[in-house]
Image: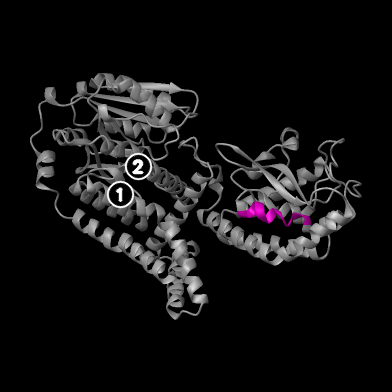
Amino acid sequence: MSWIILLAMTAVIIYHHIIYTALMVFLGRTAPDSAQAEATTGPCSEAKTLPSVAIMIPAHNEAEFIDAKLANLVVLDYPAEKLSVWVCCDGCSDNTAALVQAWQAKYAGAGIQLECIVETENKGKVIRINQLLSMVRDQADLIAMSDVSALLSIDALRQAANSFTNPKIGALTCNYLLAEATSGEQQYWQWQNSIRQTEAKFGSVMGGNGAFYIVRAPLFSYLPEDTINDDFIQTMLVIKQGFQVQFNHYINSVELSPSTAQDTYQRRQRIGAGNLQQLIRCRFVFRHSHHGARWLFTSGKAMRTVMPFILIGYLLLSLSLAIQGSALALALIVLQAAGYIAATLPLFGVSSKATDKLHYFVSSYAASLIGMLRYLLGHFRSGWRHLPPLSNYQALSTQLLKRTSDILLASIGMVLTLPVWPLIALLIKLDSPGPIFYRQLRVGRISEEQVELFEIIKFRSMFNHAESKSGAVWARQNDSRITRIGHFLRVTRLDELPQLLNVLNGDMALIGPRPERPEFCGSLQNALPFYLERTAGLKPGLTGLAQVSQGYDNSLEDVKNKIAFDHAYALALSSPLQWFKMDLFIIFKTIYIMVSRRGQ
């Protein structure tokens, strides 16, 4: 049975990455269908017969690109009286709104309607799309969406209008080009453009692209506020209503904003979460009468969504069979290990075309997997908000390596220490009445959306209800609340072993700032500037640079001294090599403290 499953997984991996992709790319590079070519290159219609177009642009802090975007739209080859542009500033803290308003006179001079809606609160892209839709739906024949950082070819709207002369077409998407990109990213989007052109030949493109897509106004749908990939869901709903989504390869959208490694990582997480969400919400494709759409969706988006889970399962199953003595399984393990090692080489400066592309695809799957896991844990309940991540100081590679090492080392720690847990539990029970474990609410990672709270788990080292009268207070030397066995557990740090469960659950990291109680955080932030920033984009740790350098907090001065250590650790995360050296030092220092019983 194991070999049958492994064979089936091999077939799926080869089919999705080689057979399906190669077929779609090959067909997409051939000339477009004659019907499509005739529709998109035919004679231009008279202005009075062209459909009216409304372009909707939700914007959050887009001062860098908004001028170029509005300059691009004002010169599009389309009748001015048929075109309107609607910009909604979604809680912008920069001068985006002022820049848009400065263009209104120029647009009025060109005869084009430019509306600027200014909202003081940042509520997210989808809410603003729904808001704009309620304003323009009855005023235009076609509604277009276009990212601020994407410029359109000058005849984009005329090309689109010509395509919509076919009554079966409900939405249209186009070529997506990058002004600046890595070789891996460039290759990926070349393939995607070819695949979308092939999908169009089979009936419908599976999803649009936020750089530019355009929909018949009656078919443009209001979306749930938690929608992540709005461009994909919006165009798929056109298919649900019985119309085609076509690809016009004569229209180009050019992305101006270069993607840093951190930007790509964050976007891939969002796309991964969105892919899982759309796989759930686009189930109607599997019931659709158009079998082509069902096959395209399954072979493309659906398989790409589940592929990270398949690859992990493939590795684990190969490892299981290799342990049982299979030479073939051992060979598969070697091949997979070689591939993943090659994918990490660019992180250490070893770069080539092959390794760069491999790194792009493997890191994309890794980020997508993390995004899907975050979605399952409820981290995308508010959909997508265009906010810069607080973890920008952390290198993408460091984040991936840090979480991987957390899972690996916490798992090893659990296996090695689990035999002593029953003994510790027995000693706690014999020493004093009360539960074995102690749970306490702590402040976790602070993100751009929320402050995470979690329950930390420890072996109980104090008498039960020790703070019932005093309330929350710091530990101190010769603390009368600590039991006899509790004293031993604290000096050896064994009381913190159950926190390995917090690490595996993702509440904590193995190494990071100490997680503080909410009761103390307010007063500490008022007394000590930059205190809460200790965990901005960073999970608190079971141990950390501050803990091994200073020990437990007994006073405000102790906390003040620790802040410098915590921020010093955060700086080390900008480089994988610095992070590795720092974590290695902290791990050995922690082991030394435990063995020498220097804890408190």
Residue type at numbered disc 2: Cys
Q: Secondary structure at mark 1?
A: helix
Magenta stretch bounds: 495-504
Residue on which disc 2 sits? 282
Q: Quadrant of residue 532?
A: top right
Looking at the image, residue 530 sits to the left or right of residue 554; the answer is left
Looking at the image, residue 574 sits to the left or right of residue 37; the answer is right
Residue 305 position, x and y percent, is 39, 52
Give the CA separation, mark 1 to mark 2: 9 Å
Residue 508 position, x and y percent, is 64, 50
Along the line of sight, the residue nearer the viewer: 78 or 339: 339
Q: Earlier in the sequence, mark 1 or mark 2?
A: 2
Residue 578 position, x and y percent, is 60, 59
Q: Is residue 107 visible?
A: yes
Residue 463 position, x and y percent, is 86, 47
Residue occupying image coordinates x 73% and y 32%: 526
Outermost residue on the left side: it is 43
Which quadrant of the figure contains the N terminus? bottom left
